[in-house]
Amino acid sequence: MSEWGKGFWAMIGVCLTWGLSPLFYHQLADVAVIEVLAHRTLWSLVLFLGILGWQGRLGEFRRTLFGPFLPRLAFAATVISINWGIFIWAVQAGYVVESSLGYYIFPLIAVVMGLVFFGEKLLAAQGVAVLIAALAVILLTWGLGVAPWISLSLAISFALYGVVKKSLPVGPVLSVACEVAILAPLALGWLLAQKAGIMPAALAHPVSFGTDMQMSLLLAASGVITAVPLVMFSYASRRVEMSTLGLMLYLNPTLQFLCAVLVFGENFTRWHMIAFAMIWLALAIYSASALIGQRAEARRNA
């Protein structure tokens, strides 16, 4: 198999893992969101340290973690933990339709972030796509009587994460390892306080890890489904062109949406239908514009 083919199938694995992850987190519906998030952080760190140790990069990990990029890594850790927490809560509370919408909106929010933070030029077609997406959100807000806060929070937090990562001269595996290392003391402290029963009454929740074998294994596995796709994504990004990766990533929210409607039986109103149709149209315009632009640049550089 060619290197491109290996990268392509690795990316398929990434999209399948992320897109079907609601099925996994739905199994943890009886576990407090923060406990799930804490275990996801700690077990991810264990796995990343194992990978970096196998690669002989633990020294590089320590230098990066305590180096000049610490403030940016800490901010990245904060926004991605918010993203993870909202997503886990959305799955547990039955809002996977809204979470899938958020990841559809994300590429268009990222265009705006590029304009604001990096002075990137907004092509006419991209401007039309962003406008259609904004109208879709406004229409959905008017139709449902409430703004799609879950969708917007997921899209904006992930876009902010992308802004930080774009400015970090650190590889994806190393940077995420540093991010979960920054979060690890908070995660461990939370679990110890929960175990000791010293949490405020409003936050108190029975400890799940260690009380049931299946639940404990699922919580440990949350680290695997966090770390492994990121490693696979890093592998794929070195072998497959970014335009292809960008289009393939739409498989993630599509699978989330199918899980929500076909497996969980979530309500999909006509307002959702109209908004999703507008978002899909916006993404089609955005993707076509990006592909045309990349092909034109390739011809100029040929």
Image: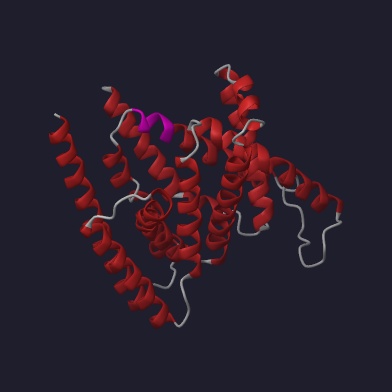
Please name the residue shown 57% across and 18% down the image. 54
* Picture layout, residue 194 above or below residue 71: below
Please name the residue shown 42% across and 78% down the image. 141
Side of 35 where 234 appears, left or right: left
Residue 202 screen position, x and y as percent: 77, 67
Q: Write down the quadrant of residue 128 in the picture.
A: bottom left
Residue 192 in view, yes or no: yes
Question: Number of callouts in the render?
Answer: 0
Residue 226 screen position, x and y as percent: 53, 41
Side of 30 where 202 appears, left or right: right
Residue 44 in view, yes or no: no
Split into 4 quadrants, where in the image is the N terminus? top left
- What segment is highlighted magenta in the picture? 233-238
Q: Write down the quadrant of residue 88 in the picture.
A: bottom right
Who is closer to the viewer here, 145 or 14?
A: 145
Please name the residue shown 46% across and 47% down the image. 163
Who is closer to the viewer here, 67 or 256?
A: 67
As for residue 234 lying within the magenta part, the answer is yes
* Picture layout, residue 241 above or below residue 292: above
Who is closer to the viewer here, 148 or 271?
A: 148
Split into 4 quadrants, where in the image is the C terminus? top left
Residue 227 screen position, x and y as percent: 53, 36
Please tell me whether the stretch drawn in magenta is mainly helix, strand or loop: helix
As for residue 180 lying within the magenta part, the answer is no
Please name the residue shown 17% across and 35% down the image. 298
Q: Residue furthest top?
A: 56
Residue 33 screen position, x and y as percent: 64, 57
